Amino acid sequence: MRYAHEVSRSLPATVALEAFESAAFHGSFTTAARELHVTQGAISRQIQTLEDHLGVELFVRERQRIRLSAAGEHYLTHVRSAFDRLEAAALELRTLRRGGGVLQLAILPTYGTRWLIPRFPSFAEAHPDIQVHFTTRVAPFDFAGEDLDAAIHHGDAHWPGARLDALMDEDVVVVCSVAYQKKNGLKAPADLRKATLLQMATRPAAFDDWLKAKGIGGVDGRRGPRFEHHQMVLQAAIAGLGVAVLPTFVCADELADGRVVEAFADTHLRTGKGYWLVYPERRAQLPALVAFRAWLLLQHARPATAQPL
């Protein structure tokens, strides 16, 4: 049965887009012509056809030189994104034919570097035909508007229109360097009043939440320098810049080897939040995601002292 295509698309020819992308990259019609094995005149005509189609000038012509116009710079980002997605789709189809696939995965920066990447070789070895493309994210996003198959999410078990698999609860600990602890005489939570509190920009309430959960008042938990990632906060604590609230998986190695210590006794706290694998319903049966999900859940189910598979 044949179906009528109800939407009429007004799309430029691919050859014109290739000419535009190459000319924009090289800043030269002549170099683009050599790259695409056509004449300089052919490139010029393709660009002119594209500009006529769009109704804007993509390049500013200055004697023998060209440069992208403001409209051209804007359009170039979309053209390159479209080519990247077409290339990824072709790669995915080829690998799917071999039983593999491509997984577009968004990860939290510190979770990726401290937890996931050190264990990832076992997945790569077990699934050589699956390519995982990692993107780091700290801000919320919408699966409907982005080319992502899954994400590692921190927070509550809530993401509209998506499935969530629990990975691990979040436990935090208050740490600093030995030198900082001794210099500032840190012995109890009240001593945080005179300490520099190392803050993470995306979790400005981390100290306040810890203080509230521990029933401690009289400390301004919002003051102190801010850093973008947990890894930066940890390095600041190691350097003796102050005291940090960190997830235990972030600083476990540094606690074990003494580069940081608990600022005082009994700082551990389970926050009530956690880490989740999140993916849209429509991607749930993607072979690459099915394989990655099974591996990831197994890794998180194993004891922390066990070696990665």
Image (cartoon, grey):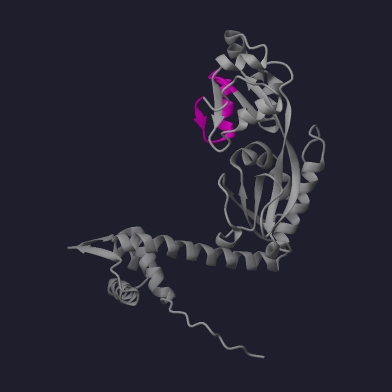
User: Bounds of the magenta span?
Assistant: 224-243
- What x and y, as percent, mark residue 275? 70, 43
Asked if residue 62 can be seen in this view, the reply is yes
Q: Is residue 39 above or below residue 152?
A: below
Q: Is residue 4 magenta?
A: no
Instruction: Please tell me which residue is depicted at 44% across the width and 63% down the height of the picture.
Output: 78
From the image, which quarter does the N terminus lie in? bottom right
Instruction: Report the number of discs.
Output: 0
- Above or below 152: residue 99: below
Query: In which quadrant is the C terminus drawn?
Result: top right
> Which quadrant of the view contains residue 111?
top right
Please state the horizontal and vertical placement of residue 13, each as a whole percent of the image.
Answer: 42, 77
Does the magenta segment cover residue 238? Answer: yes
Q: Quadrant of residue 122?
A: top right
Q: Nearer the viewer, residue 231 or 270?
A: 270
> At which x and y percent is residue 147?
57, 60
Q: Quadrant of residue 108?
A: top right
Out of 15 and 262, give the one closest to the viewer. Answer: 262
